[in-house]
Amino acid sequence: MALFSNVQDILSLLIFSVMASSSCPLNEELQCSICLDVFTDPVTTPCGHNFCRTCLNKFWTNTQTCFCPLCKEKFSRRPDLKINTPLREVVQHFKEKKLSFYNMFSSSLSVVTVSQWCIKYLKAILK
């Protein structure tokens, strides 16, 4: 029996390899610019930038004036940060999907091999 029996398996594998890539646009959108990891308990500053709550609190602990680590906008007082629930749910869904794809394919192939395999065979299928 073939490891991947249909086009859907191949497409799922391709999605996984892209999601696992650090250059994946979704990965970048869900990444804290302080710790460079996917958000944990994301909060939004008054200027609209998102960070992990712990990262931003630690950052502000070491500064006299609170400002956005990304755009440097200063805040007259320390903002009361609340978890950005919709963003947290998106992050959770992303992590679950990434883990699901990883568990599905990691036992048999490495990400590099998966990426190379997908590119080679998708080109053949799409011709």
Image (tube, helix red, strand yellow):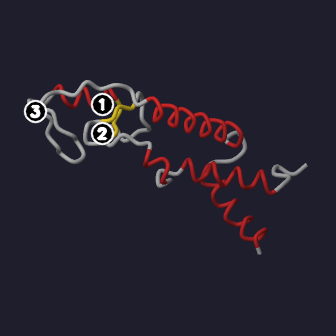
Q: Which residue is mark 1?
A: 55
Q: Is residue 50 above or below residue 20?
A: above
- At 47% from the left and 55% from the top, the residue drawn is 23
- At 25% from the left and 37% from the top, the residue drawn is 46
Residue farthest toward the right in the current orientation of the protein: 1
Relative to the observer, which residue lies in front, 107 or 53?
Answer: 53
Q: Which residue is mark 2?
A: 34
- At 8% from the left and 29% from the top, the residue drawn is 64
Image-based side of 127 in relation to 85, left or right: right
Callout 1 amino acid: Cys
Residue farthest toward the bottom in the current orientation of the protein: 127
Callout 3 amino acid: Thr
SS of the residue under disc 3: loop
Q: Which residue is mark 3?
A: 65
SS of the residue under disc 2: loop
Image-based side of 109 in relation to 34, left or right: right
Cα distance between the residues tagged 2 and 1: 6 Å
